[in-house]
Structure formats: C-alpha cells, structure tokens
Image: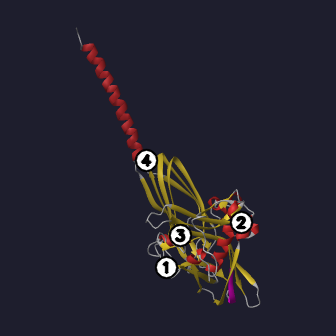
C-alpha cells in the first residue's frame, strides 16, 4: 500500500494547525505590547480650586484586552502623602471612574493625579496623568480633638476591656453622624460652621501608629472672632433625617446607603460594633452591633470654651469621649449587653434612646 498520499495530507494538516497557532501567538504578542490608555476628562490639567471646594474627577481607561485592576491616587506634592485613594478590581475593556473630593491646605499646594492600570496580559500603565492646585483657605481652622477612652484606659480597636457587668468586650467600629455644628457668640448668636458630616473614628483607630492618640476633626474657613462655646449634634436633624440617600451623590455624607434603614425610615445616627466574651473563656462568641437612629435619638452637645478664632491659625477644642460611660453612665443602670447585643429592630427604640443619652453624657 502506497502511504505517500496519506503522509502528504498529514503534513498539510500539521502545517495548517501550526499556522493557526502562530497566527494566534502573533495576535497575543500584538496585544501583549499594548498598555492601557486613558483620558482625563476632569479636572483640567493645571487648574486651580479653593480649599474645601468639591472637585469632580472623571477618568476613562481603555485597553485592547481586559483591564483587571486600577488605582487612582491624589498625592500632595508638599508632603508626598496620599490625600485620596480609589482602588478597584475590574473585568472590562473600558472603565469610567467618577467621583468628587475636596481638600484643605494651609498653603497653596499642588496635587498630582496618579493612575495605575493593569490588563490581563500584565501590561501596566503607571504615571502622573495630571495635576491641580488647591489655594489656601482663608479664615481659621477649628480642630475638634476627641481623646478616646475606656474608663482610665486609652480606647483602642480590638483591645480586650472589662465590661461593667463582668464580661469581656472588644470593639471594631465607632462612627456617627454629626450635624449643625455651630460656634456660639457671647450674645448667644450661633454661627453655623458645618451642616452635616459622617465621622468614622474607626479609620483613625485602625492605624497602629495613631491608636491611643486623640482623634482630630478639622473645620476650615472659620471666620475670625471671639466665641464662648461649641454646639453640635450627634445624629441628624429631623429635616435631614426625612431625606434618603438616593437624593444625594454617593460622596455626600447623606448619600451613604449603608447608613440608612429603610424599615426605620431613618439614617443610622451611630454605630458601635465589636465582640463579646460572655463567660470569660477567652472566646468572643457574640457579635455586638449597637446601631441607633430615628428622630428621637438626636442629641445636642454643647462644650463651654473660650475661643479666639484667628486667620490662618488652628484653634483646638479638647474633648474626652469615654466609651465605658456609654455602657455605665454615672448614676445610671448598666446597659444589658447580653440581652441586647444587636439593635436592628424598631421594638428596641428604648435601648436606642438610652444609648443616645449615654453617648451625649460621655463626651465632655
């Protein structure tokens, strides 16, 4: 039997397969050499903004293959510190990154916009894609400094503390809404400095270099003057609380959907979370999630302090926030942490009101 015809066709088939493989390899090589591209839509490179001015950012990334991750860093060129970071994993060929952010600076400062994007061939775009300047904010700065305590101890996340009724407790989150921040003049006139904000002290406490140090919350652009007190809310006004997150941008404090209870028709005014060891066996078996909201939970705090606000100067107001007093108020009953370690139900409004009262009295 003559096998030459069969051998001929086998060679043709092998040649065809190899041609297809080499063609695919060439295509892959072509894609492998192309890093992601970008367009900076906003802000315009070299533009200037005022301190605390909301800056819209819009960046488009595209690639011939798939973008698997990206990082956007806004870097302060004076300190070389990161003023903002946005980082996400991805699985598309194009990405539109949009957000708003504001910055406060004591002197005019240039910020760089750094972009890193990686595609599924491990090609990396890593460069400064633009810059902008933030001008110095006129007026003084009000620095609210909270010395966080648990009784006589410094308050730290994930530290074990003795609960007043004998259990062991650790904490993993401390956050709250504040609203209607005012300075009070000698004649009783209140001058609003800030309408609303969301304060997450957990981020400060998560930094091991900052744990045990006061939490600093600064408000810039305060008009110079002499004042006798600071007045602010823990929680939201009834007008603010009647709104819903979809009415705001995702970067607005009231636009945080994770901080709103649809069933309560209320924002979550405060969150204290952690773990509880009920029986002292060293195992923290119970979750603690004390979430309070509703108009009834709004509390007003007034700190008497002589304040001389001057242009370009930081003025500190030092306060103590004792978390132990949230659970064991002076002259009051110990909060029953075993009966109500979780607050998520309208039936627990009495517990919410009790904790709101205790939080007010624990800040002085």
When asked about the image quadrant of residue 299, the answer is bottom right
Q: Indicate which disc, 3 or 1, sits on the residue closer to the N terminus.
A: 1
Question: What is the number of the mark on residue 294?
Answer: 2
**Residue labelled with disc 4:** 120
Residue occupying image coordinates x 40% and y 43%: 30
Q: What is the crowding at mark 2: few (fewer than 14 residues within 10 Å), some, or many (at least 20)? A: many
When asked about the image quadrant of residue 356, the answer is bottom right
Residue occupying image coordinates x 67% and y 68%: 352
Q: Indicate which disc, 3 or 4, sits on the residue closer to the N terminus.
A: 4
Residue 47 visible to an observer of this rendering? no
Q: Indicate which disc, 1 or 2, sits on the residue closer to the N terminus.
A: 1
Distance CA(mark 3)–CA(mark 4)? 35 Å
Q: What is the crowding at mark 3: few (fewer than 14 residues within 10 Å), some, or many (at least 20)? A: some
Distance CA(mark 3)–CA(mark 1)? 14 Å
Q: Secondary structure at mark 1?
A: strand
Q: Secondary structure at mark 3?
A: helix
**Disc nearest the viewer among 2 and 3:** 2
**Residue labelled with disc 3:** 202
Q: Indicate which disc, 2 or 4, sits on the residue closer to the N terminus.
A: 4
**Residue labelled with disc 1:** 154
Q: Indicate which disc, 1 or 4, sits on the residue closer to the N terminus.
A: 4
Judge whether residue 235 is colored magenta: no
């Amino acid at each position: 039997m003559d096998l030459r015809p069969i051998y001929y066709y086998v060679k043709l088939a092998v040649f065809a397969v190899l041609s297809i493989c080499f063609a695919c390899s060439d295509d892959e090589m072509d894609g492998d050499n192309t890093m992601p591209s970008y367009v900076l839509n906003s802000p315009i490179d070299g533009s200037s903004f005022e301190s605390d001015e909301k800056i819209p950012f819009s960046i488009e990334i595209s690639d011939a293959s798939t973008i698997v991750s990206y990082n956007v860093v806004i870097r302060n060129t004076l300190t070389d510190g990161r003023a903002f970071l946005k980082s996400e994993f991805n699985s598309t060929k194009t990405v539109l990154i949009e957000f708003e952010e504001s910055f406060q600076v004591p002197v005019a400062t240039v910020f760089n916009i750094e972009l890193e994007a990686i595609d599924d061939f491990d090609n990396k775009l890593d460069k400064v894609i633009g810059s902008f300047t933030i001008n110095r904010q006129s007026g003084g700065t009000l620095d609210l400094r909270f010395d966080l305590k648990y009784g006589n101890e410094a308050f730290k996340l994930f530290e074990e503390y003795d609960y007043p009724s004998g259990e062991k407790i650790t904490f993993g989150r401390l956050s709250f809404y504040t609203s209607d921040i005012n300075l009070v003049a000698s004649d009783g006139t209140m001058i609003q400095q800030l309408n609303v904000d969301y304060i997450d002290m957990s981020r400060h406490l998560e930094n091991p270099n900052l744990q045990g140090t006061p939490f600093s919350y600064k408000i810039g652009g305060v008009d110079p003057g002499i004042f006798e007190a600071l007045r602010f809310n823990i929680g939201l006004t009834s007008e603010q609380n009647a709104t819903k997150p979809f009415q705001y941008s995702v970067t607005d404090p009231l636009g945080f959907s994770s901080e709103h209870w649809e069933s309560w028709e209320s924002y979550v005014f405060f969150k204290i979370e952690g773990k509880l060891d009920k029986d002292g066996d060293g195992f923290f078996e119970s979750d603690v999630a004390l979430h309070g909201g509703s108009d009834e939970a709004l509390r007003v705090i007034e700190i008497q302090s002589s304040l001389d606000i001057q242009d370009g100067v930081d003025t500190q107001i030092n306060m103590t926030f004792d978390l132990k007093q949230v659970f064991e108020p002076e002259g009051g009953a110990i909060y029953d942490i075993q009966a109500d370690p979780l607050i998520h139900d309208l039936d627990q409004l009495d517990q919410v009101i009790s904790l709101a009262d205790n939080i007010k009295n624990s800040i002085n």
